[in-house]
Amino acid sequence: MLQLSKIRCTAGLTVFALLMGMQTSVFAASYTLHILAAEGDTLPDGTTIYAIPSSHGEIKINNAGLDAFHGAPGNNEEIVFTNEGKVVTVGDILPDGSTIGRINADGGASINDAGVVAFHGRTAPDFIDTVFTSEGIVASDGDTLPDGSIIDGIDFTGGVAINDAG
């Protein structure tokens, strides 16, 4: 049994922990705790995590053990991370040419087995509510869908998901 948890420690430190173990009864489980990322960690890309806000949506983990989450590197700037490093931050230009104007952490972030991360935000410079992946825009407020309907609002609190097809 795998369980990914955001844990608030007694010292006020937030960590992401992967609990691995087996359910031993209806009321008890045996777990081994593996810390994936913690406030104060320096990630493999050299970014130090200053804060992992406990109010910022769900965290997701893929089959390779990469987790996707929101955090701040110390200057209160919103960043989407994996436990390997920074994925995107405000002002980044994505591979499709779109620019991140704002990252909205309320809906969390999600990651597929290819390492593509999905998250909510707004485009720049026009600040249109958008669902992004680390590769570009998936859909924006006002887009026309294949069936002819028009997206009329994106609920940031509804969460975000991505499958292995992207």
Image (tube, rainbow, N blue to C red):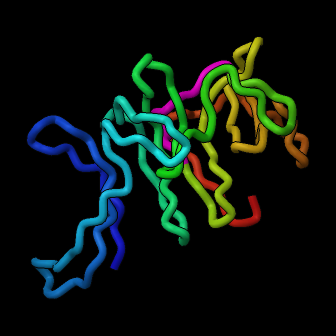
The residues colored magenta run: 101-109
Residue 6 highlighted magenta (yes or no): no
Percent across and percent down for residue 104 are: 54, 28
Percent across and percent down for residue 127 are: 70, 16
Percent across and percent down for residue 121 are: 62, 28
- Quadrant of residue 101 within the rendered picture: top right
Q: Quadrant of the N terminus?
A: bottom left
Q: Quadrant of the C terminus?
A: bottom right
Q: What residue is drawn where x is 40% and y is 35%?
A: 49
Residue 105 highlighted magenta (yes or no): yes
Secondary structure that dominates the magenta span: strand
Q: How many marks?
A: 0
Work out whether 10 lies above or below 155: below
The residue sitting at the bottom extreme is 24
Percent across and percent down for residue 153 are: 66, 28
Q: What residue is drawn where x is 59% and y is 55%?
A: 111
Work out whether 137 lies above or below 129: below
- Quadrant of residue 112 within the rendered picture: bottom right
Q: Nearer the viewer, residue 44 or 152?
A: 44
Q: What residue is drawn where x is 17% and y is 79%?
A: 30
Work out whether 71 lies above or below 23: above
- Judged left or right of residue 83, residue 32 is left
Work out whether 128 lies above or below 34: above
Q: What residue is drawn where x is 50% and y is 48%?
A: 44
